[in-house]
Amino acid sequence: MTCQLVLQFKGDEPLDFDVLVNLEEKLQELVAPTADAMGHAFGSGEANVFVLTADLVATFERANRYFRMRRC
């Protein structure tokens, strides 16, 4: 079964969009090959990255480790 993981961040500045795109690319590297970062959305003070995965917990843990190392 495939699940969708949505990682949500605060962001509404024009430069935040470039950061979001770079983050999506980095997440794709981190979660491949067991998951796939499938896109992003930006607006209303929020930035989202969408990840499709069969293992929701493992994918979240990988992403969370990355954010903890970067202190995001």
Image: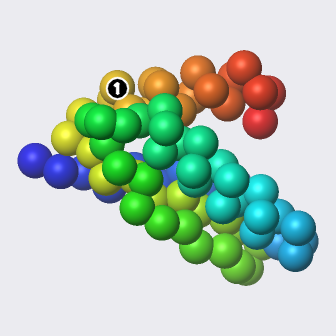
User: How far from the left and from the top, in percent, is residue 9?
Assistant: 69, 54
Q: Residue at x 69, y 23 (%)?
A: 68
User: How far from the left and from the top, in percent, is residue 67?
Assistant: 67, 30
One can see residue 56 in this view: no
Compare residues 66 and 44 and report the one nearer the observer: 66
Q: Is residue 55 left or right of residue 32?
A: left
Q: Hey, which residue is sitting farthest left in the picture?
A: 1
Give the total of numbered labels. Answer: 1
Q: Residue at x 57, y 28 (%)?
A: 64
Compare residues 33 and 46 and report the one nearer the observer: 33
Which amino acid is tagged 1? Answer: Ala
Q: Quadrant of residue 26?
A: top right
Q: Hey, which residue is sitting farthest bottom in the picture?
A: 44
Q: Residue at x 77, y 57 (%)?
A: 19
One can see residue 48 in this view: yes
Q: Which residue is mark 1?
A: 58
User: How far from the left and from the top, in percent, is residue 72?
Assistant: 77, 36
Seen in the picture, residue 48 relative to 25 is either above or below; the reply is below
Dot 1 falls on a residue whose secondary structure is helix
User: How far from the left and from the top, in percent, is residue 51?
Assistant: 40, 52
Q: Is residue 46 left or right of residue 12?
A: left
Seen in the picture, residue 58 relative to 42 is either above or below; the reply is above
Model colouring:
rainbow
Neighbours of disc 1 within 10 Å: few (<14), some (14-19), many (20+): some
Q: Residue at x 47, y 45 (%)?
A: 28
Seen in the picture, residue 29 relative to 43 is either above or below; the reply is above
